[in-house]
């Protein structure tokens, strides 16, 4: 991993409210509020200030604190003025200040006279004082609390995301844009305010990479509209777009990245060069940009020539005794095996042209079967800049770890992404009905979760974060709403607090889970994907 992106994104209330123009890595825009107004608000709400300092409230709790601060500021401020006027001598409201002691006003100065309780002497009021003398020690104590509370507030943001060296350089967590599709959300949500709020929350949290595809329904359109609405806060220079994938990066790090996929549609694949070009130009229009940072050929196993002894099962034998059956022996690795391979090569040549024209900055491929992803990577010239594998680095299937040396040392792939640490929902309490896992595997997963009292999705995220962190892989996670962004960042914060590793209890739970799957033959088992 490369250096960390240390930003000053302040508290969850500031980030999630949408009221502040927060930008990761650009703290000056928040300086007036956080360093001037916020301490004043804290003064007028000392009890909640002390409570906030002690428990470090987050999320909606911190929003409640901030709202209460505002209420106390308004009510207490007005009450204090009335209190001072009722306790003070003759007081003058002048053009230059308010209020002022009567004795301080010069002759002929335009004033409005207010006589309030003139029987009291003027000893308790002097120009420039903010509080009555008798309250001095109390307010000094409260101001001290406010100072430390504000300091904690400034430091309350989630730990910064590490960056993975590229090209392209990416944050440790990447936003999976498939969530903005009919697979996971209905049209009412995707056309509402939810996606904009979610994208804003993600970028403020440092998740500056977004994955999408034309195959994901209206995902590109939804994300494009969100970027357009946030362009004042996050102009094009601050994020990265990739078709099939969309990456966003802070301005002070890199220009933003958009990644996206091409070639796959809802019911068919079209890898023809003319369609590849048309698809890229369409994405440029949808994202309101002149270039895309990364473009993938999507799900290559549906187009490439089939070279596999079986459709499903464990495929790590492709790296050893089954090399020939998978078309991976060294003397055949760069050989076109049929018409499907030729179609992939022709589409790749068009991507290379688009890259030369400046419309794309990086090009790559995605796919599910790791042997096919490796074989096609060796077939393409020039080699891909980046590849994405999904559902092959999680609690149930860890095969990507076995293939990493071949991708890096043999295929010379600079950047490898791992997607879906929850294995497309298989590692959740509610497995999607459309999930391709067979009934026996689904039953095993459901039985384990009934017997185990732990949080399997959180364990899966911790496993994904640790494994990807150790191996220098950006982790792609699907996010649908602000709550899910806050959840993933809370897990990330705990992961960092643990020193970037799982706890002993989590390792024990992982070992138990692995043993259960191994007994059924499901460890590293992959379902069928691709043309027959």
Image (tube, rainbow, N blue to C red):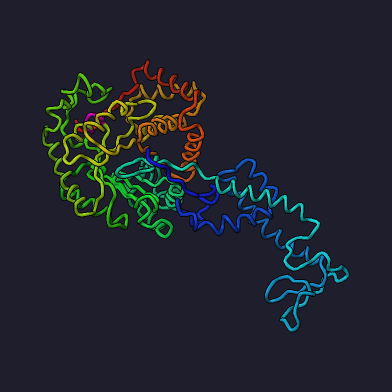
Q: Position of residue 409 (x, y in %)?
A: 24, 31
Task: Let me know if residue 121 is in the magenta part.
Answer: no
The answer to whether 519 is drawn above or below residue 76 in the figure is above
Residue range highlighted in magenta:
369-373
Q: Quadrant of the C terminus?
A: top left
Name which residue lies at 41% across and 40% down. Answer: 162
Front position in the image: 270 or 461 = 461
Name which residue lies at 81% across and 74% down. Answer: 115
Of all residues shown, which one is farthest toward the bottom? 108
Q: Quadrant of the N terminus?
A: top left
Q: Position of residue 201 (x, y in %)?
A: 46, 48
The answer to whether 359 is drawn above or below residue 426 in the figure is below
Mostly what secondary structure, the magenta segment?
helix
Of all residues shown, which one is farthest toward the right? 119
Position of residue 473 in the picture relative to residue 489 (left or right): left
Q: Position of residue 353 (x, y in %)?
A: 17, 50
Q: Position of residue 12 (x, y in %)?
A: 53, 47
Name which residue lies at 60% across and 43% down. Answer: 57
Task: Let me know if residue 371 is in the magenta part.
Answer: yes
Name which residue lies at 73% across and 62% down. Answer: 130
């Amino acid at each position: 991993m490369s250096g960390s992106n240390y930003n000053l994104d302040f508290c969850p209330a500031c980030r999630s409210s949408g009221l502040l123009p927060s930008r990761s890595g650009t703290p000056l825009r928040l300086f007036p509020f956080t360093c001037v107004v916020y301490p004043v608000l804290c003064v007028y709400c000392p009890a909640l200030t002390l409570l906030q300092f002690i428990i470090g409230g987050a999320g909606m709790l911190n929003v409640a604190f901030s709202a209460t601060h505002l209420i106390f500021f308004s009510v207490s401020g007005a009450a204090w003025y009335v209190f001072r006027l009722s306790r003070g001598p003759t007081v003058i409201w002048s053009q230059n200040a308010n209020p002022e002691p009567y004795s301080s006003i010069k002759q002929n100065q335009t004033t409005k006279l207010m006589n309030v309780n003139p029987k009291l002497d003027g000893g308790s009021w002097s120009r420039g004082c903010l509080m009555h003398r008798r309250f001095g020690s109390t307010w000094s104590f409260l101001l001290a609390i406010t100072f430390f509370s504000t300091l904690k507030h400034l430091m309350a943001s989630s730990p910064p995301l590490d960056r993975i060296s590229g090209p392209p350089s990416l944050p440790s967590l990447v936003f999976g844009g498939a969530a903005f599709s009919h697979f996971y959300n209905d049209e009412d949500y995707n056309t509402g305010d939810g996606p904009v709020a979610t994208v804003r929350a993600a970028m403020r949290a440092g998740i500056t990479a977004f994955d999408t595809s034309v195959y994901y329904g209206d995902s590109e359109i939804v994300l494009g509209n969100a970027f357009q609405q946030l362009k004042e806060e996050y102009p094009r220079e601050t994020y990265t777009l990739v078709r099939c994938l969309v990456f966003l990066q802070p301005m002070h790090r890199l220009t933003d990245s958009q990644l996206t996929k091409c070639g796959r549609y809802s019911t068919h694949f079209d890898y023809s060069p003319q369609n590849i070009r048309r698809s890229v130009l369409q994405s440029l229009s949808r994202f309101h940009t002149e270039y895309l940072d990364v473009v993938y050929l999507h799900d290559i196993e549906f187009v490439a020539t089939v070279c596999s002894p079986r459709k499903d099962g464990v495929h790590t034998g492709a790296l050893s005794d089954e090399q020939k059956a998978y078309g991976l022996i060294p003397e055949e690795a760069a050989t076109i095996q049929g018409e499907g391979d030729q179609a992939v090569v022709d589409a790749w040549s068009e991507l290379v042209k688009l890259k030369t024209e400046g419309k794309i900055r990086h090009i790559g491929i995605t796919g599910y079967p790791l042997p096919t992803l490796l074989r096609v990577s060796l077939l393409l010239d020039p080699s891909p800049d980046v590849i994405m594998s999904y559902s092959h680095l999680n609690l149930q299937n860890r095969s990507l770890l076995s293939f990493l040396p071949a991708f890096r040392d043999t295929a010379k792939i600079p950047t490898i992404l791992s997607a879906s640490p929850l294995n497309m929902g298989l590692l959740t309490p509610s497995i999607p009905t459309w999930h391709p896992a067979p009934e026996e595997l689904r039953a095993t997963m459901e039985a384990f979760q009934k017997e185990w009292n732990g949080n399997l999705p959180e364990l899966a995220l911790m496993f994904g974060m640790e494994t990807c962190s150790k191996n220098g892989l950006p982790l792609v996670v699907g996010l649908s709403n602000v709550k899910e962004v806050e959840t993933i960042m809370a897990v990330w914060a705990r992961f960092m607090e643990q020193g970037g590793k799982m706890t002993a209890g989590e390792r024990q739970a992982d070992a138990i889970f692995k043993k259960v799957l191994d007994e059924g033959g499901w460890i590293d088992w992959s379902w069928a994907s691709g043309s027959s």
